[in-house]
């Protein structure tokens, strides 16, 4: 029989106490090990209220200013700016850093603000193209995250996923825009347009 968990007490009774090490591992800052993980990570997921969005670039694209401050360049995208809209009204943010081939991740939670500063953006320029803005994150929590999800998914086993019948971006876009665009044309165009417009 289905029931809905409706209280923290009920939830805690269902799952029990966390392992002591899972509680002790949480920091309120970026230490040297967190810094090294961030420096090696080419991709992270940003969670804001109502949205999760990937950010990726060469390893080290996220700058650790000090133990409580991160800077993330906001590279070119589709200009929906969903995450940025959310940050303006609800600055709480969650970051999940990943490194290909590594099964544990790094979680960082904090508050973010969108910085417009020509000189700062210039320090993040690639091929002479700076980001429009930089996210400044005030770190409140940081900790290594359990590897079970990535191990279960076998996510870094590229051979396992070759030939998986996933719809293409173009197919999804054509269907979801009710034919406003032609999927095959989008997929073909993206082969050259996306690499040429990364920054």
Image (spheres, rainbow, N blue to C red):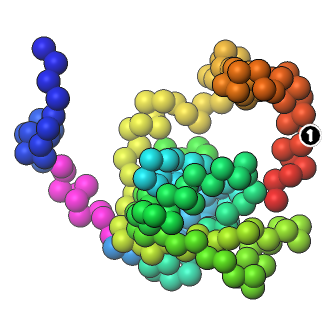
Q: Which region of the structure is painted magenta?
A: 18-27
Q: Is residue 48 left or right of residue 187?
A: left
Image x and y of residue 179, in percent = 77, 21
Q: Is residue 179 left or right of residue 21?
A: right
Where 126 sits versus 5, above or below?
A: below
Q: Is residue 49 magenta?
A: no
- Please identify the quadrant where the N terminus is shown: top left
Q: Quadrant of residue 115?
A: bottom right
Residue visible at 60% across and 58% down in the picture:
41
Where 31 sits versus 159, above or below?
A: below
Image x and y of residue 54, in percent = 60, 49
Q: Is residue 71 left or right of residue 79?
A: left
Residue visible at 43% across and 69% down in the picture:
111
Label 1 crowd bin: few (<14), some (14–19), many (20+), radius 10 Å: few
Say whether residue 96 is visible. Answer: no
Say what secondary structure mark 1 lies in: helix
Residue visible at 52% across and 72% down in the picture:
113
Image x and y of residue 36, in percent = 55, 68
Residue visible at 14% across and 24% down in the picture:
3
Q: Quadrant of residue 109?
A: bottom left
Q: Nearer the viewer, residue 116 or 30?
A: 116
Image x and y of residue 162, in percent = 69, 21
- Please identify the quadrant where the C terminus is shown: bottom right
Q: Which residue is mark 1?
A: 192
Q: Is residue 76 left or right of residue 17?
A: right
Where 134 sits versus 44, above or below?
A: below
Q: Is residue 22 magenta?
A: yes
Say whether residue 170 is visible. Answer: yes
Q: Residue furthest bottom?
A: 119
């Amino acid at each position: 029989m289905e029931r809905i968990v409706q209280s923290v007490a009920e939830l805690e009774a269902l799952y029990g106490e966390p392992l002591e090490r899972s509680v002790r591992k949480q920091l309120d800052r970026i230490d040297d090990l967190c810094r090294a993980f961030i420096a090696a990570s080419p991709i992270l997921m940003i969670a804001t209220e109502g949205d999760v969005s990937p950010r990726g670039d060469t390893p080290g694209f996220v700058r650790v200013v000090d133990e409580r401050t991160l800077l993330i360049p906001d590279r070119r995208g589709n200009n929906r700016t969903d995450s940025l809209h959310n940050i303006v009204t609800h600055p709480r943010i969650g970051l999940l850093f990943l490194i290909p081939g590594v099964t544990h991740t790094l979680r960082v939670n904090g508050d973010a603000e969108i910085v417009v500063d020509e000189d700062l953006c210039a320090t993040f320029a690639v091929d002479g193209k700076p980001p429009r803005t930089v996210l400044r994150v005030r770190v409140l929590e940081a900790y290594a995250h359990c590897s079970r999800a990535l191990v279960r998914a076998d996510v870094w086993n590229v051979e396992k996923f070759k030939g998986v019948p996933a719809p293409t971006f173009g197919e999804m876009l054509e269907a979801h825009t009710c034919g406003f665009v032609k999927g095959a044309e989008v997929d073909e165009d993206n082969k050259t347009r996306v690499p040429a417009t990364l920054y």
